[in-house]
Amino acid sequence: KATFNIIKERLQSSLTSQAEIFIAREGYRPCAKRAAILYFIINDLDRVNPMYQFSLDFYTELFKNSIKKSNAAEQLNERINNLNEYHTYAVYENVCRGLFEHHKLLFLFQICTKILIIENKINKDELEFLFNGGIKPNKKEMKQLITTKCPDWLPASCWDNILALCNLPSFYDVEKSFEKYSTEWYKWYLSPEPENLKLVGPWENKCNLFQRMLFIRSLRLDRLSFSIKHFVSRNLGRQFSETPVVDLKHTLNNLNNTNCLIFILSSGSDPINILTYMNRNYNKKGQFQSLSLGNGQESIATELIKIGQKEGHWIFLANCHLLLSWMPQLEKIIENMQDHKAHPDFKLWLSSKPHPKFPINLLQTAIKVSTEQPKNIKSSLLHLYQNINEEQYSQNHASIKYKKILFNLCFFHSILTVRKKFLSLGWSKIYDFSDFDFEVSENILFNCLNEYEETPWTALKYLLGNIIYGGNITDIWDKRLLDTYINQFFNENSIKTHFYKSSSLINCIVPENGTLQFFKDFIKTLPCEDVAETFGQHLNGNMIYLTRDNYLLCETLTSLQEQFNGSSVDNDKEKKVLFQISQILQNIPSLINYEIIAENINIERSILNTVIFQEAMCYNNLLKNMEITLMTLEKGITSLMIIPPNIENMFEKLYEGKVPDQWLKTYPSLMNLGAWMQNLIERVKYFTTLVNTSQQPVSIWLGAFTSPASFLTCILLNESKESSVQIDLLSWEFIPMQTSVNELIKPPDKGVYVHNLYLEGAGWDNEHLCLREPLPLELITKLPIIHFLPIEGKKNLLDFYQSPVYYCPKRSETHETYLCAVILNLKSGSHHPDHWIKRSTAVLLNLGN
């Protein structure tokens, strides 16, 4: 009986302990929820970039470390809050180390929104609007009849967002506010920082912090990232307001002889300088060997690792993406390193550009660090001065002159590398100006000034503009821009003028003579945020690249949200695409009946009729191709036939509302599918009218031609025939008109009137018929009708800006019709033509969305 009582007491005690453990465990459930949310966010990052791979073991160790290092507390709620806060920031800090800069905010916002959704602090419909704006993947019908008209000052795309916003319960009748408070909203819209202003009318008190972001998303997409940072900071804490800085020493402590570190490369980046610095300061052995991988380097790399493991060297294998076939063997070598037999000082470093076939296991086990070129002038200057050889810096015979020109060289290099953020207003193509270009230029500058008493400006400009930096450039207009910068930074005034100004800004000056540390200290006084004028750009230039970045941010968040929601979205994909196909087939215009113009060509051979005939043929071929591919895809979706490989990508394109690649072969466009279809209908209608009338119209819509160069050549041929002047001796004179299309009665006796031309990167003065500074948020300006007049010889182009003409806003030469074969000469107004060269001002025949 005594034994029975003992067992009974122990069982009772055991049950009591189990209950206490259960209660204690349930108390920590908020930590488990938070940890699970963070893990699944990390696990989805590989959909953003294939190099963002993180293992469960990595996350488990991170969580254990958070338990140990987070502040203890007597109260359970306080302890849970401490653990959640510490672990959330630990995840953010450790994962950010391997993310590119433009993905760090995306990752942080994912953390913030997922946490708030679980806590029911964010409405899911409002979150969906933030991601998609007025264009939703599953667009619902309007819940109410909208009678309010779009304000004159507001772009149509922004008004579409507002009309979609008023369908959300919290924003009912928001569109009426723009009618009642139009002036106030206009001031808010034009503000450089609208996210810091109060909302107009009653909406200031109606909206919470998240709902305020929906106004930013609708009206000023360029400011969304700043609004998101403020929102995250208010909800997660101030420590999340700044991006964690990669601590090289801390990273080095985590690297040992059993694992490796991978540098994830972006365009133009090279970690060799980072490794050289770390080797100089932290490597006791001082032995550092690097190898750039490529075909035939397998055995050399293997032998290099063996020697490094034996003697304790640091081994750096660069560009692993160029030797992916050897990566499985490298993976086995790293697995064998777990036996701890390698020398304690041995360390293995790798670098690779993102590639979907890079081994996942290798990515999950390795320490990942992203490397990018500096994103602003200040960071770039500090980076360059950090790598300048101090001994060489102080030994140059022409010390004062050398230091000034070297600073200009650093500023020049920084301008070239950072300028690409302005997209098409920066460079027509993306160029990889690297640190190696700067190092070569620095050595040439050092040698030139040591050997010659007078500065050899001509030689320096030639080497920089045609070989070192100019050797990267393939576009003639980019070469013109490079030459303009070279003339600005490398001239006699830059070394003779005290505090020579590198740009129009007050603080952009060349410091006087000083030590290397003096120049570094001066650079630290420069602003962290770049001002557009530093590059010769207008403030509107910032808006363009910020809008693009924020649009991509929302697009990526949308795709991640769809993955998070599972297959519910996938089930509607086919229905939506089938609906899109039926809508397009219903709206495809009829073929152009070009038999009339064919008869005219047979009767009277006219060059103009021949060009119009060719254009009609092109559009008819496009319309036939559209009908065939759409019907084939429709049959494939409904399982009536197998979808051919050449139209497989059409499904995703139509679902995303984009124009299929097959249709863009006729002429390039950056419009979305809806805008492109409307534009196509207008083009076909235009050429149908031309064919039916069989005579030259009063004014030409040049952007409607699939080959504008052919039409302009046709005009020159006609003039050559009538005037008996060789076509090679003819050129164009461009005369802006102050009349509208409706006021013109007949075409000109010579040449043609051209309408629907657009100006990007400048404004237009209708009174003086010249270029002017654009107004705030004036990104595109419509030019007046321009008379294209053929003349013999060439006109004096002093005070004229020679503007390239592009078919659409994309300026790449990958499509033969992106660049039109004409240069439009426009009066430069009160500014020198170089001013507009730095603005990358250009004329467009067609717009984007």
Image (cartoon, rainbow, N blue to C red):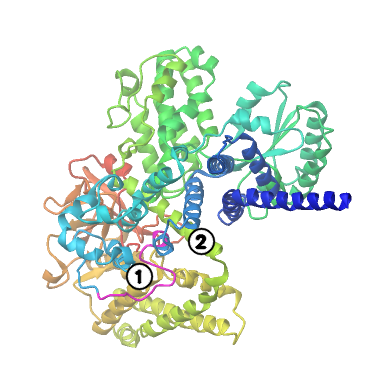
* Res 143 → quadrant: bottom left
Distance of label 1 from label 2 (alpha carbons)? 26 Å
552 relative position to 641: left or right: left
Callout in the foreground (1, 2): 2
> Tag 2 or tag 1, which sits nearer the N-term?
2
Query: Mark 2: few, some, or many residues within 10 Å (few <14, many ≥20)?
Result: some
Against 154, is 617 above or below?
Answer: below
Q: Which residue is mark 2?
A: 561
Give residue 185's position: percent from left, percent from top.
20, 55
In the rendered image, the quadrant that contains the C terminus is bottom left
Residue 733 visible in the snapshot: yes
* Callout 2 secondary element: helix
* Res 133 → quadrant: bottom left
131 relative position to 244: left or right: left
- Decide whether residue 477 is among the magenta residues: no
Task: Name the main secondary structure of what is drawn in magenta.
Answer: loop
* Callout 1 secondary element: helix
Residue at the far front: name it: 1
Q: Tell me the magenta residue range.
A: 130-145
Against 689, is 502 above or below?
Answer: above
Give residue 359's position: percent from left, percent from top.
71, 51
459 relative position to 780: left or right: right
In front of the other: 733 or 418 = 418
Q: Which residue is mark 1?
A: 675
Residue shown at the point (47%, 40%) measured from the top left: 240
Residue shown at the point (77%, 43%) measured from the top left: 298
In front of the other: 587 or 13 = 13
Looking at the image, do the residues carrying marks 1 and 2 touch, with CB atoms under 8 Å apart? no
Question: Which amino acid, by three-letter code, is at mark 1?
Answer: Ala
- Decide whether residue 142 is among the magenta residues: yes
